[in-house]
Amino acid sequence: RDSCVSDSSDSVISSGSDSDGHIYKVVLLGEHGVGKSTLARIFGGVEDTHEYEDAGNTYDRSIVVDEEEANILLYDIWEQDNSQWLKDQCMCMGDAYIIVYSVTDKSSFEKASELRIQLRRARQSENIPIILVGNKTDLVRSREVSVDAANRAEHVPSFSTEKFIETSASLHHNVCTLFEGIVRQIRLRRDSKEE
Ligand code: GDP
Ligand code: MG
């Protein structure tokens, strides 16, 4: 079990505030090949350019969710190098995390669970928003991870800030919903802190 302080305050007082000018850092985590960079490029609106090296990129975009603008810096740098320093940086720099696995690769799913636990441990007293993403749903015949298995893995009642979604970056299915979801998660946490 995660060694996390369970201080989830579910009482959210909606302040109806406007964009607060803050830039939220969202970090992509997950095994190689699961689709992190593809999702990031869709978010950044640069998916058709093949000149992007996979050396690690950051995408700066503001999106409107629930009639409120959100400034997001999306970091696709998890695999930029193999240094422990970078991994540690990634674990502490994010305001929110998108942990990706491929539904066609059970080991990437297990890795995702491991990363989630590591992250909870690194940020124990914080109720950091995390979205677990099962990508590549278009590859129906190669599916190795069921929706049920993922839902079970996410069933940790004390964390109100965890969500799960399946996407297909190739088909652009649920990609917008994913990024809207992370913004909503960030706001829930922000608003509950402000009370
Ligand atoms: P990363 O290593 O996590 O950054 O993964 P990439 O974004 O580089 O994707 C790895 C490979 O999976 C590439 O060939 C992508 O085109 C492919 N890919 C990414 N998302 C999907 C998807 O939703 N469906 C399918 N069929 N392929 C995908
Ligand atoms: Mg990549």
Image (cartoon, rainbow, N blue to C red):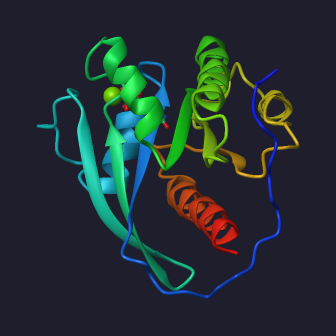
Tell whether 88 sits left or right of 58. Answer: right
Ligand 2 occupies quarter: top left
Q: Position of residue 160 (x, y in %)?
A: 78, 52
Regarding residue 28, the answer to whether it shows in the image is yes
Counting every numbered tag in the picture gives: 0
Q: Name which quarter of the figure residue 21 lies in.
A: bottom left
Tell whether 148 sits left or right of 91. Answer: right
Whether 14 is drawn above or below 29: the answer is below
Residue at figure coordinates x 56%, y 56% from the top left: 182
Tell whether 1 sits left or right of 172. Answer: right
Whether 102 is drawn above or below 135: the answer is above
Quadrant of the snapshot with the C terminus: bottom right
Q: Position of residue 156 (x, y in %)?
A: 84, 37
Q: Position of residue 127 (x, y in %)?
A: 67, 47
Residue at figure coordinates x 64%, y 85% from the top left: 15
Residue at figure coordinates x 67%, y 23% from the top left: 113
Regarding residue 47, the answer to whether it shows in the image is no
- Return the residue nearer the eye: 187 or 50: 187
In this view, which residue lies farthest toward the left?
51
Whether 163 is drawn above or below 67: the answer is above
Quadrant of the snapshot with the N terminus: top right
Residue at figure coordinates x 82%, y 69% from the top left: 11
Q: Name which quarter of the figure residue 147 lies in.
A: top right
